Image (tube, helix red, strand yellow):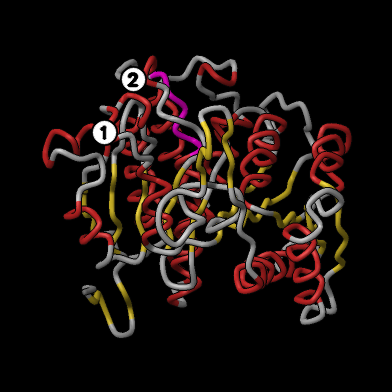
Amino acid sequence: MRNHEGPGERRIRLGLIDGDGIGPEVVSATRRVVDEALAAAGAAPADWVPLPIGHAGLAEHGTPLPEPTLDALADLDAWILGPHDNASYPAEHRIAPGGAIRKRFELYANVRPARAFAGVRAAAPDIDLVIVRENSEGFYADRNMFAGSGEFRPTEDVAMAVGVVTRAACERIAHEAFRLAATRRKHVTVVHKANVLPMTMGLFRDVCYDVARDYPGIEVDDEHVDATAAHLVRAASDYDVLVTENLFGDILSDLAGELSGSLGLAASLNCSATRAMAQAVHGAAPALAGHNRANPAALQLSAAMLLHWWGTRHGDQRVRAAGDRIERAIASAYHAGIATADLGGLASTSEFTEQVCARVHRR
């Protein structure tokens, strides 16, 4: 499955999925930055495996999520996914590829950092936190029932949804959060709504506290999700790692991304113990497609997270170092006043990428 460049060295094979809208532009920009960072870190070059989804999948296979793409992903342990525009797919194919891929490969953890960069105007200039979102169940109707959707209408005028919370899923996401906190400021906040959902959210909260006993060096507390939203706006720097349910994590991470400056900075990694997918939080922005104006930083930062994940899993410090180089290069570009239009700058997608590529080679 993998080529070997030397004794004990694995060569990273990465799926490359353009997606829709600005996807081809930001994915291409991300590939270039990853290639430069791997070279600068002395790591073996990546083997890229291009795969279609979205409109490209419809054109080639008649579906936005082709089985050949899924089969190919099953032979990889990491890939980069561009944004998709499922609202523009034909009604009979209105599937969200990202959610379907997360479900297919049980990518149960969605890790979403929010960090302010020097040189970027941010509503919360001291924000530096990570939201660890349970990715496999909760209140999302597309993935919480054994067969069919968890949403249904018993009558024309009544719609209902089923939320699912299991001890096993709570335990594994809590372990992700506590392991991450051990590498940061050693503080986990459990975010829930147990005051009105005592069985489901109460189980989530209680299991997180049970898992906390395995991490005696980590401070743990809990908050209701509405209080957390208010607290983020007022004092985002109080948070280190937040662990929460699927829907709550989706909402809070968008809020945190905007507080850090823009969703154009909002990186995200979907992962399990064996596979990972880099996917920016933002959407396909079809109005910007083809104009060389999109901000590629969110996907580039997501790719840096992917390199950290892969390098840690395979004990490859050079691949981890490549991820570090991408993060530092982007921070350096922003500190120098180089930014795309969404952040008030003048750089195009390609110009920003050129600056990041030049900076990954700096020591």
Question: Residue 275 placed where, x, y %?
Answer: 41, 66
Q: Secondary structure at mark 1?
A: helix
Q: Is residue 121 above or below residue 23?
A: above
Q: In the rendered view, does 202 fall on the left or right side of 3?
A: right
Q: From the image, tell me which residue sits under label 1.
A: 92
Question: Residue 223 placed where, x, y %?
Answer: 86, 51
Toward which corner of the image does residue 126 lie, by quadrant? top right
Q: In the rendered view, does 287 fall on the left or right side of 132?
A: left
Look at 81% across and 38% down and name the residue there.
232
Q: Was residue 294 drawn as part of the magenta stretch in this picture? A: yes
User: Mark 2 Cα within 10 Å, few/some/many (few <14, many 20+)?
Assistant: some
User: Mark 1 Cα within 10 Å, few/some/many (few <14, many 20+)?
Assistant: few
Which mark is in front, 1 or 2?
A: 1
Q: Is residue 309 above or below residue 86?
A: below
Q: Was residue 198 drawn as part of the magenta stretch in this picture? A: no
Range covered by the magenta-colored residues: 293-298
Per the rendering, the mark at residue 289 is 2
Per the model, the C-alpha gap separating discs 1 and 2 is 24 Å
Asked if residue 361 shows in the view, the reply is no
Q: Secondary structure at mark 2?
A: loop
What residue type is disc 1 on?
Glu
Look at 48% across and 67% down and name the residue there.
272
What residue type is disc 2 on?
Ala
Look at 75% across and 71% down and name the residue there.
207
Residue closest to the eye, 360 or 17: 17
In this view, the residue farthest toward the bottom is: 7
